[in-house]
Amino acid sequence: MTWKVDKSAALFCSPGAMAEKDGVRFTAAVLPGQEASVLLYDKTSGELLQEAEFPAEAAVGELRTLKVMDLPWNKIRYCYKLEHEFVTDPRAQFLADRAAGEDTPRSPQVLCGMDFEPYDWMDDRAPAIPFEDAVMYHLHVRNFTRHPRSKVRHKGTFLGLAEKIPYLKELGVNQVKLMPVYEPMPAREQEPAKKERPGTPRGRAAGEMPGTAMELPPHRTDYWGYVEGSYFAPRRFYASADNPAREMKDMVRAMHQNGIEVLLDMFFTENTALRTILDCLTYWVREFHIDGFHIMGKAEAGRYLAKDPYLADTKILVSDASSWNWNGWKRARRFAECNDGFLMDMRRILKGDEGMLEAFAYRVRRSAKTYGVINYLTNHDGFTLLDLVSYDNKHNEDNGERNNDGAVCNFSWNCGLEGPTRKKAVMSLRKRQMRNAFLLLLLSQGTPMLLAGDEFGNSQAGNNNPYCLDNEISWVDWGACAKNAALTEFVKKAIAFRREHRILSMAEDLQMSDYKSCGSPDLSYHSSRAWYGGFEYNSRQLGMMYCEQYAQQEGFLYVAYNLHPLEQELALPALPAQMSWYLAADTSTEAGFLPSEQKLKECRTIRVPARTIMILVGKKG
């Protein structure tokens, strides 16, 4: 079967496959003098149905175009052929494996799919959550639900992630940031193609069926996906059926219906054209209703996107927002800075390093009027939180690189023993350090970002760089969720406490002055002396008092931080008449948060146990 081909030039043509009233227009970038054609295959059998040559005269710049009339796109797969190479359309809507059993040399390993069927978004609306109100959750779509104990039906897929929405809501999450969900760029294949086992997608070992663990191939596939990609195509590896684009839309729609935003990590190489980047992000917003992007790889891309009107309401995360000139910007708060500064300073104070108190205080209060600030203690690249308090050294032997990959300096501390242990004292200290870590994160200004599984002690066995592992080392272990229910409950309460006390998530910088004449500064520091911070080199303890009137609430908060290995005493400022201090949380206890706030006797000081954070609430009573 063949179809009529219209080879006349179009006034405007965009790269990729586009539905027109009377057919499908294909447009590809082709170098001058190069032969190029579109190959059309039967979706079911993989049979080559037609080869249509791009005419050199129907070109706009280096874009060549043709239209296949009355093409039944839902029954067709396609690719391009440039000279003698099979080439995947870099703007394909989704990719599909070659049909099983099809063995003709003119059938490449990966084909492109089309889906022009309108999608019912059911009046979908973006949650539009300000950065200061967000609690972000960072995850890998497959890793998050692939584990046998994940208790979802569609393990390792977009739909599996959607099944976890009730859990995310209960935890208190309202943003998810996904590691790359676009297809890695398939390798070009020569004609005739090599005889290989059919149906092998990138990211799986030869002959492996979807849903099984990948045996690490010799070339160590980048399973994380931070590589050059087919940036417009959701990854078929994360779909339960043959249309990943539709399944991802289902997931995003379900997230929005539950008030959760979806942000994507996008890694662009230095060779990626800025026009392609803009087209890509616009496409994801238009077709998938994505709420934001973390731009990685190409440094200048963020500045290029800054004033694009279509992306005016789209969140953009960059690494260097603090170095930008924000004068005259009206929509700057859609941008946020996301880098490892918070991670490095907070990890060091958590393990008790000296000389870190000023950096610690800065990170806790840091916000910005002109852009958001994303804070995290753990990320996909590095130790999980449990591993951060369980290992002094990385253990990446499973990656096949003789433990030479991954960061050497992790600012971690194993609490006395390397790796798993049954010693109760060590286990108790690790749990306390994890509670401390969550409060360091959730009591800081800016947007807190949690790494998936940290809230119940997920471990990667000391591997701080499992970029190539699709197995239980990198999968989130949902079996730990039941074992560490107390930690998860603590995290839920910490997130709820943050939301209850607006002074902990202000849209503008805290000024550490009484600029509203409330009788107290918005934030003040205290040591063994009230109203005196005491930032000596060997100090690892500090009291921070917040006046909640600056957030249109009544009362005070006092957070007593002691990351010192010895008990410390901190001064308590006097409260206004009729008000008292109540203890709300104490990380030296297993629960962390008290069942009910405990009123303290009138006192001028509070003794804080070693490596402990305590939260006091000042209120009437």
Image (spheres, rainbow, N blue to C red):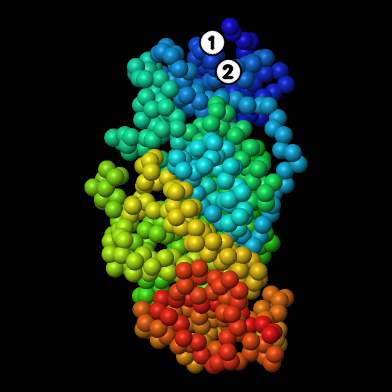
Rendered view: 352 above or below 110:
below
Residue 306: % across, % down: 61, 54
Q: Position of residue 281 (x, y in %)?
A: 59, 43
Q: Nearer the viewer, residue 598 or 349?
A: 598
Q: Name which of mark 1 and mark 2 comes first in the sequence.
A: 1
Quadrant for the N terminus in the image: top right
Q: Are marks 1 and 2 in contact (CB under 8 Å)?
A: yes
Viewer-nearest residue: 163 or 141: 163
Where is residue 260 shown, x and y percent of the image? Answer: 64, 51
Q: Is residue 290 left or right of residue 402?
A: right
**217 shown above or below 495:** above
Q: Which residue is mark 2?
A: 76
Picture quarter containing residue 546?
Answer: bottom right
> What amino acid is labelled 1 in the image?
Leu
Residue type, mark 2 in image: Ile
Q: Secondary structure at mark 2?
A: strand
Please name the residue that numbered disc 1 is placed on.
49
